[in-house]
Amino acid sequence: MALRKKRNWTVPAGTEPTEFDRRVMYWENKGKEVPTRSLLYTPEEIEAIRRAGVVNTGVLDEVAHHICAGMSTLQIDQICRDYCESHGAIPACLGYEGFPMSVCTSINEVVCHGIPKAEDVLEEGDIINVDFTTILDGYYADASRMFIIGKTTPEKEQLVRVARECLEIGAEAAKPWGFVGDIGHAIQAHARKYHYGVVRDLCGHGVGRAFHHDPDVAHYGKKGHGMLLVPGMVFTIEPMINMGSWQVFIDEADPYGWEVISEDELPSAQWEHTFVMTEHGVEILTY
């Protein structure tokens, strides 16, 4: 006798399936990956994440007011931590799996998870991603922005612009009752127009009650693949777009083993927001 496959989607005992339940179970019966009920957030929880998002946006706005050539990434870390804590929140990165600082500061060829340092001083023409996650009243909000220091090259300007377009296009592709793969497919198609590489080793993720949970949101892929997207899910989209190859490596000189660098050491750019899926599409929670 064949073993019955364990179902992801379950209906509470003693209740009849709702129309929502039936829609999810339809896709699960078709062999698609569907979320568990635990991945859905209540309206009250979504508002709590939104409040964390307000602080998170304030952190990045504060960085925008001060960032300039001659500033060290350690100074950026202090700005982020001070703003976050002065608004009653906690920097999620600080101490997370050994990460030593409050924010990720990734300059030029550093794709992500750059560690702030006194010796990393911003120069005219640099591009930098500042990635911050806030915990407020137990709920997480996660976002990142690119900053151009002074005047940079047309090639770097285009990379930063296209990376932002990839985030926007990925968000437009995220539809209720669509699939995670729809997001990655749209992002990859746009990046290919510019012969850019879409990093495959890292992805977006569910966020809210925890820093990271399902679904994994790959920024490449095929339409109709990946987890079913349903209203109430909260996740990030955060494409990392490389000017050259999509491949990356971990800097062996990094004693913490965090900094991810493009394989060919060409510049990389990334933008990120936290989104909630609604009946009409995604809504940004980190404005």
Image (cartoon, rainbow, N blue to C red):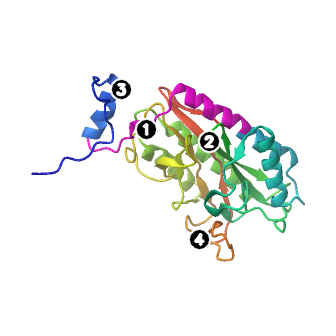
Neighbour tally class for label 4: few under 14, some 14-19, many 20 plus, Cα within 10 Å: some
**Labels 4 and 3: the sequence-earlier one:** 3
Q: Nearer the viewer's eye, disc 4 or disc 3?
A: 3
**Labels 4 and 2: the sequence-earlier one:** 2
Q: Main secondary structure of the magenta part?
A: helix
Quadrant of the image for the C terminus?
top right
Relative placement, left or right, of 126 versus 171 is right
The residue that mark 3 highlights is 20
Q: What secondary structure is marked by label 4?
A: strand
Using the rendered view, name the quadrant where residue 274 is placed. top right
**Labels 1 and 3: the sequence-earlier one:** 3
Relative placement, left or right, of 186 versus 16 is right
**Labels 1 and 4: the sequence-earlier one:** 1
The residue that mark 4 highlights is 249
**Pointers 2 and 1 in contact (CB under 8 A)?**
no
| Residue 103 x/y as whole percent | 72, 54
**Pointers 2 and 3 in contact (CB under 8 A)?**
no
Q: Which residue is outermost to the bottom?
A: 252
Residue 45 lies in the magenta stretch: yes
Tell me how far mark 4 sits from mark 3, CA to CA.
Answer: 43 Å
Q: Amino acid at mark 2?
A: Tyr
Residue at 27% x, 23% y: name it: 16
Tell me how far mark 4 sits from mark 2, CA to CA.
Answer: 28 Å
**Labels 2 and 1: the sequence-earlier one:** 1
The residue that mark 2 highlights is 140
